Amino acid sequence: MKKRNQSRGSRVKVWLAMLACMTVLVCGFFFAAKQHFSSMDFGMKNSRLRKQIDDLESEKRRLLLAREVSLSATELKKAATRVKLTVGDAVTPELASLATTVKNKVLAATPAAATDQRSATSNPMIQKTVASSAVNAKPIAASLERSAVERPRTVDKKIVARVTTAAE
Amino acid sequence: MRKVKKAKRKDMRQVAFTRFMLVVAVFVLWIGGISVRLVHLQVTQHDDLRAKAEGLRTNVKQTRTLRGTIYDRNERALAMSVPVKTLYADTAEIVDPEATAKAIAKVIKVDVPTLKMQLTQAKEANKRFFPIAKKLDGDLVEKLDKSLDDPAVHKADLPNFSGLHWKDEQRRSYPNGSLAAQVVGFSNNEDDGKAGVEMSQDEALHGAVIKRVQERDRLGRVYDEETVERDAPSDIVLTIDTAIQNIVEEALATGVKNSQAKSGIAIALDPKTGEVLALANYPTFDPNNITDQAASNISDHAIQYVYSPGSTFKIVTYGSALERGLFRPTDMIDAGNGSITVAGHEFSDHHTGMMTYAEALAHSSNVCAIKTGLRVGKDDFWSMVKKMGFGSRTGIELPAETAGIVRSPEKWNGDSLASMSIGYEIGVTALQMTTAFATIANDGIRTQPHIIKEIRHSDEQPKTVTQLEQTQVVTAESARNLRTMMRAVVLDGTGKRAALNGYSVAGKTGTAWKFNSASKSVDSSKYVSSFIGMAPADDPKIVVAVIMDEPGVGARDGGMVSAPVFSEIAQKVLTSWNVPNDQPIKSESLVAKNDPPAPSKEAVPGAKTTVPSVSQPEAKAKSGLQKDAPANHKTKDVKKTTEKALPGRDRTTAYLLRPRTRFET
């Protein structure tokens, strides 16, 4: 009787051990599967982020080009003509641009020039100059803001900030 | 009975054992078969199956990194690449070409029936890559993606439309348009440099191929990606200054238009470092749009065009004489009656009598220059020509530079030394001449001209590429004396229009007849007019050369056509650099403006008289030339020259002509 009780107890222990092992095994499988799918998920997120970086790099490149185009001598001359500054007044295009900036500040300071200033804001220099080129026709900041808002995918704000800093 | 029972039990065991063994055998065979199959699949067919499996889940994308950027010395981009995308159709995936064509036509202006026909034809030909819209930029790509979004289609990549895909490409852009176009050059659609720095530095600029191995799930979503990338391309920083380049190009364009010249070249060089600050050609081209451009506009004449330098070459003659100590600038020389005969060839001009060497150079007396050249002698003259760098490439980092045409003394004629003393029988490039003047400006030290400041690698320290090669060609004293003589050219000689306000100038004018390859003779109606100078004269900060090809109106000599352009360039550059004045500033500028030159019939025979009614004495006074020359003298001489054809000479001898008569200076 005692022997039978002992063998039953040991059998239960064996079963329990087996159950524990199986539980561990099943949990292991589940854990591995979760890890696998999680890895897949991270991979996909990673891929999306990588694509986002590529897109932002492309955007940055386009904006840099737009900046270079808008700072070119031809565009500066056009801008100078627009604000009625004769290019002959300045020795170099850089000075011409400087003179344009100064003149704009002076214009902005006078109330009479408010209307002109408003019209200039509605048609800012960069917008027009960039439109004449084969690149994105939008100001640097506006472009980044717009792309961040309009794009269906979410844009990492840190990356945007980094790109903005680099572009500046 | 017991025995029977025992036997029966034994039989049952035997049967059970046999059955058990059969089952085991079946299992063994089954497992063995599976094992054999597995071995067969995993060992023998391993590679094929692996490739098949990878093909199902992996996708290899090959793109090219963006081509390197070309910057000017102030980090302003002169050429850069931007990523763009090309929309293409995989016609095997397209079911309805008409619907596809209509969807695309909503955003891009294309003719629907034409596109439909093209798609149908491509589908019939089973084309897997049929480009529809090439090199679109970001905005248009976004618009197309939105427009082509088909909810019925489930694709991991945009556009979400069956059979349409994007291909990543790049487009080369030149933000400054035609500025420094010949220097920067351009690259073609295949990302290969075809001219200028784009061509000479193609290896450094060329974008590496990026191989991306993407693993995708059944929905096409990328879950793993491995990128294999070669060395990233390098960026090139040029010595060109965009601001100076702009000044030079504007002045040159105005000068060419005013003088109605065929073309013009202008170079600005830093004599101390040999850095080319600006190099301009006119007419020029826009590298953003190279279709329909004349080939002559694309080539860089400053290093590829060979011309007879004329009187600007006299600095070599006088420089070699000064180096040998044959004279001092204040010594006297006799121009005689204005003519000299060497080896049966008479050279003549309008300067007569005694004058100082400085005056001889200032008024560009040919007779005096020839006499000086003859005193120097063949060997020393030849040595100076070689030391100044004529007859060999300057080594500038631009493609297709020519060495010019210089014959060795063994091939010279009896009058070759005389001819070369005044800049004939020799072919030079504008850059060679500018470098020679820069040598004088740099106290006799010749610094190799260069246009690349550094090649910048992404992951390394900036790498300076140009190892400066410096040679003492003439002594500092000889160079200073020559500069003093050249100052007289601007103060009281042929180059008065090169004068600056607030700065001293040393320079030399040059006017040479062009060789007509058709008639194999010099053409007295076609000139190359030049002025090469430096400022401030005592410590030159800049050397500027202006060469006009075939000026067509007014007085067409270098002093009238090119000197004002020099003046405009040098004045603006020195002012913007805040170089301290070494001369008093005149309140009312007496500096010559770059106006259309007045006609000077006697100075330039055969000139078109499009600008009317300027009397000969006035014209003489304006040009400051030929004060004593009879009005019809030169015309007669020129006629004689033009009639003298030189048969049997090939193109090489175009620049080696012996002058037959008096030359304009």
Image (cartoon, coloured by chain):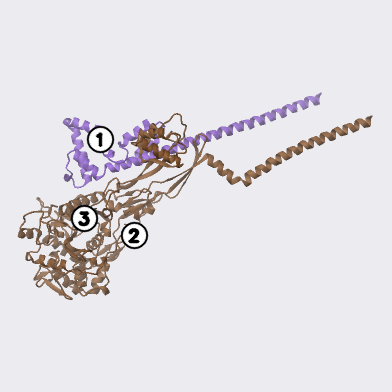
| Callout 1 amino acid | Pro
Chain drawn purple, letter? A
Subunit under mark 1: A
| Callout 3 amino acid | Ser
Residue at point 61% right, 33% down? Answer: A29
Subunit under mark 3: B
Cα distance, mark 1 to mark 2? Answer: 46 Å
Say which element carries label 2.
Answer: loop
Q: Colour of chain B?
A: brown
| Res. B334 in view | no
A47 vs B45, nearest the viewer: B45
Is B297 situated left or right of B15 in this image? left
Foreground: disc 1 or disc 3: 3
For this orientation, the residue located farthest to the right is B1
| Callout 2 amino acid | Gln
Foreground: disc 2 or disc 3: 3
Q: Quadrant of the N terminus of chain B?
A: top right
| Residue B467 circle label | 2
Q: Quadrant of the C terminus of chain B?
A: bottom left
